[in-house]
Amino acid sequence: MAGMLAILAIAFSMSADAFAAALGTSIDALVVGVTLALLKADIVVIALAIGAATFLMATAGVALGRAAGARLGRVAEAAGGLVLIAVGTTILFQHLGVAAAAN
């Protein structure tokens, strides 16, 4: 119970954007975990690989974001959002088979 109260306290103290990002990341992690369990994957190896890749990409992203944010401000923020939308749309179309039907 104390753990849940601590999580709620943290959630209420952060901005709505930070909470939305945390919630989205948590849902993504849940889906990945269920998928890996269904595939009977070696979770230790995969967790280490995901952790290393996440650390490297997040570190590079923060460095790049600071540099681009200082120079480009809102334009960099909008460009990042458009890239995420494009990647998500591409993945959605691939899973729906839309890309295969267009060929």
Image: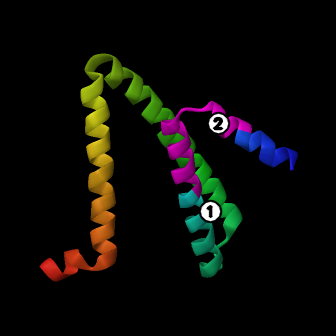
In the figure, is residue 65 to the left or right of 100?
A: right
Residue 26 image offset from top left, x and y in percent: 59, 54
Q: Which of 66 and 17 is in front in this view?
A: 17
Q: Mark 2 points at which residue?
A: 12
Residue stretch rendered in magenta on the structure: 9-26
Q: Residue furthest top?
A: 70
Residue 5 image offset from top left, x and y in percent: 79, 43
Q: Quadrant of residue 42?
A: bottom right
Q: Name the residue under label 1.
A: 46
In the figure, is residue 4 to the left or right of 35?
A: right
Callouts 2 and 1 close, C-beta under 8 Å: no
The disc label shown at residue 65, or none: none
> Who's the residue at 38% across and 29% down the image?
64
> Who's the residue at 66% across and 62% down the image?
45
Query: Does 20 appear in magenta?
Result: yes
State whether residue 32 is above or below residue 95.
Answer: above
Dominant secondary-structure state across the stretch colored magenta: helix
Determine whether the residue tagged by mark 1 lies in a helix, strand or loop: helix
Determine whether the residue tagged by mark 2 lies in a helix, strand or loop: helix
The kind of residue on which mark 1 rests is: Ile
Residue 68 image offset from top left, x and y in percent: 32, 24
Query: Which image quarter is the C terminus in?
Result: bottom left
> Who's the residue at 26% across and 37% down the image?
79
Q: 10 Å neighbourhood of mark 2: few (<14), some, or many (≥20)?
A: few
